[in-house]
Amino acid sequence: MAGFDEKNISNLHLLQPMDTWLEQTLRILFSPDVSMTLREKQKKIVDLCQESEVSSISFNQGAWILGSQIAGEFGTFEGALTNYNSARKIIEDHMEEKEGYLCVVKNVLDNLQ
């Protein structure tokens, strides 16, 4: 992340924007109490990531990409978060789709010459 260490950032939880995909991630992973405040949710994510030695910023980005760009809807997203084989299949299918799209675009560009 831009060349600085997250360990040196105070109030790291404030860098956790809570969108629908992160809310759903928390719901799937922890079934959190709906009375959790925004700050409690943000801190829970940071604590989880620090325990796992994962960047909390990358975790947030990954949840958004997996949810909004790859899974696209809650059921698929839940399957990806709860089952490694499901996650792998969803991501591989997404990559194949994008590779096919890129081949078509490359073909169009090649034919413009």
Image: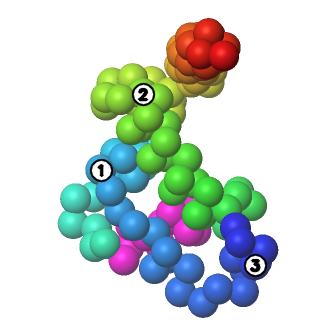
Residue at numbered disc 2? 71
Q: Which of marks 2 and 1 is nearer the N terminus?
A: 1
Q: How far apart are marks 2 and 3 (CA)?
A: 31 Å
Which residue shows up at 58% across the image and 64% down it?
Answer: 57
Main secondary-structure element of the magenta-colored stretch:
helix
In primary-sequence order, the first of circles 2 and 3 is 3
Q: Do the residues labelled 1 and 3 touch (CB within 8 Å)?
A: no
Could one spot residue 31 in this view of the protein? no
Is residue 42 in view? yes
Residue kind at label 1, given as amino acid type: Thr
In this picture, residue 20 sits left or right of residue 58 = left
Q: In this view, does 77 lie to the left or right of 46?
A: left
Q: Pinpoint residue 63: horizontal percent, then vertical percent.
A: 49, 46
Query: Percent position (x, y) of residue 81?
Result: 50, 33
Q: Residue 4 carries which label?
A: 3
Quarter containing the C terminus: top right
Q: Is residue 16 magenta?
A: no
Task: Please provide the residue range marked out in magenta.
Answer: 39-48
Mark 3: secondary structure? loop
How busy is the neighbourhood of tag 3: few (under 14 within 10 Å), some, or many (20 plus)?
few
Using the image, tell me which numbered label, if any, was put on residue 98. Answer: none
Residue 93 drawn above or below residue 80:
above
